Amino acid sequence: MNLHEYQGKEILSSFGVRIQRGLVAQNAQEAVAAAKQLTSETGTSWHVIKAQVHAGGRGKGGGVKLAKNLKEVEEIAGQIIGMDLVTPQTSAAGKRVHQVLVAEDVYYPGESETSEFYMSVLLNRGTGRNMIMYSTEGGMDIETVAEETPHLIFTEEVDPAVGLLPFQARRVAFNLGLSGVAFKEMTKFVTALYTAYVASDSSLFEINPVLKTSDNLIMAVDAKVTIDDNALYRHKKYVDLRDVREESAIEVEAGELGLNYVDLDGNVGCMVNGAGLAMATMDLIKQAGGEPANFLDVGGTADAARVEAAFKIILKDPAVKAILINIFGGIVRCDRVAQGVIDAYKNMGNITVPIIVRLQGTNADIAKELIDNSGLAVLSATEFQEAADKVQEVLAK
């Protein structure tokens, strides 16, 4: 589950990570009130107005701007709220901005220069260990840094059974070229950040930039936080942080119906039971010259109601030119699935998209008879390749 910047910062702060303070506003008037409150609490006279959407690169799209007075706060907030923000991580249509974060200006003058770093915490699946990835090149796209100057990216792997050791936090600070007060502050920051990552059951923390202020404080100026959905049962308070406005409407609806669905950009809808078979089916569609329009796992209870719900979800995508139903009957009987397809087809009425049904496993022969004798415009297949050939035929018409 992805979080907004302000939500991620709230979690970080609760574990002792120093953050750039800010308040959320839903409109320009709230933004002005937030700016006034921040001024009274922090003394800041300038404010940073940040669009709150689930996408990086907001500054490149005009979603992050500096306001030097209250009039500019009102004007900038009014411009950003309601805009369709296009960034390198959104579609061409962009994402609608519903709220902004009004944050304190932390680039204040002082005795020493400010420095920006990159830091993230994530799981290295290859080693089974958590990993802190960091770089002196904060504020830049980490992909660009990795491509052009890979020697400037450092990693620190942490054994989850032991946790982050003090010498590892010190090594991070040393590799970032810090000394004195800033060195000590960075070791505290890294330790608190890792503690927050583990305790919140997150799958990603990305802080870009981590700022060393002119008075040698270390703080998170941005925060991209992703919580592991499978651990939400242990964090009931995080469930309410979900913003469905930032998610695909079709995926949200599918989730409410108990379907595992991921929206893709292709032209062949998939209805499959089991994640492994779903991946293989998407490969099959690619080999047949098509592109999968979705990942949809109906699970082991593919009855008429569930199949009908899956049909409706798939058909919401206007790009779908054919539907491939690929079921292996282990727990679920193929004849039950076939009857579900037939019942759903009749209940929904006119379905103009060609449907190919490949059922294999328990009672597959009975299922094929049911499909073939249904009188419906449904193509049946038994073998994987046969299903692929029929997909290819349909797309060629």
Image (cartoon, grey):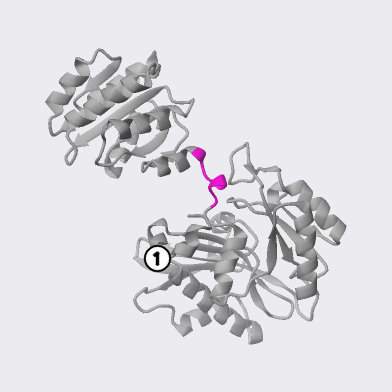
Q: Where is residue 332 in the image (x, y as percent from the top left)?
A: 19, 38
Seen as rendered, the residue at the extreme bottom is: 180
**Residue 46 coordinates in the image, percent (x, y):** 81, 65
Q: Which residue is drawn at 28% across and 43% down?
A: 276
| Magenta region includes residue 269 | no
Q: Percent from the top left, x then y, of residue 327?
A: 24, 33
User: Could you say which quadrant of the image residue 187 lies in?
Assistant: bottom right
Q: Mark 1 points at which residue?
A: 234
223 left or right of 29? left
Q: Is residue 286 visible from the viewing direction of this image?
A: no
Residue depicted at 79% across the width and 81% down the height = 111
Residue 146 occupies quadrant: bottom right
Where is 247 relative to 324, above or below?
A: below
Q: In this view, does 222 lie above or below 343?
A: below
- Examine the rendered structure and indicate whether residue 71 appears above or below residue 256: below
Task: Read off the magenta span.
Answer: 243-249
